[in-house]
Image (cartoon, grey):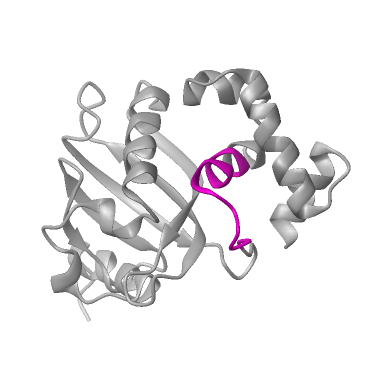
Amino acid sequence: MTLDYRTAFEMAPIGLVLSAKRLIVDCNRQLLTMFGAEQDQLLGRSFEVLYPSLVEFERTGARIVAALDKRGFYADDRVMKRVGSGELFWCHVSGRALNPDDPHAEGIWSFEDLSAHRQLKAELTAREREIAALLIEGLTSKMIGKRLEISPRTVDVYRARLMKKYAAGSTPELIHKMLSA
């Protein structure tokens, strides 16, 4: 077998996507398997089909633009949706905008299914999932508030809800329970 870039793309152990204007231009087999989709369900379609809701798709897009580093790199853990079953799962997403000045113009993104290590409580709201992901990244209430354009006090309210749902007595315990649930 001759190893070339296309073979490497197709055989990669993680899901890979080439994007333009938040549309899926190309993806590999691993991504299709991860999301329970066929190529015709994803190619040429918006990334929105991989999100639990339009609101989460839009918020994530805004967060990427705000948090992209100077070289165009971005990474986070987020909740995604399997196309075939609608099941929600934690996913590590990292990627690079080919033009940092226009982050959604073109990019390459990798997706890693975290569901074997991190289970999702089904009763979390979209905002709770978003704040949970940022807490796991180690952000403070002030940092989360700034990133999401909400007050730190609002973040604290959501953190308290998460602590109650996970029966956690502290933020470190909450993070531990979210990571090991």
Q: Give the image quarter of residue 81.
A: bottom left
Instruction: Locate the C terminus and report the quarter of the image it occupies.
Output: bottom right
Number of marks present in the image shown: 0
Q: Position of residue 99 (x, y in %)?
A: 20, 28
Residue drawn where x is 58% and y is 18% of the image:
151
Residue drawn where x is 40% and y is 57% of the image:
111
Residue drawn where x is 38% and y is 27% of the image:
68
**Horizontal side, residue 87 vs residue 116: left or right:** left
Q: Position of residue 66 (x, y in %)?
A: 38, 23
Relative to the observer, which residue lies in front, 157 or 112?
A: 157
Magenta segment, which residues?
120-132
Q: Position of residue 129 (x, y in %)?
A: 56, 47
Relative to the observer, which residue lies in front, 51 or 33?
A: 51
Residue drawn where x is 58% and y is 63% of the image:
122
**Horizontal side, residue 181 vs residue 68: left or right:** right
Q: Give the image quarter of residue 106.
A: top left
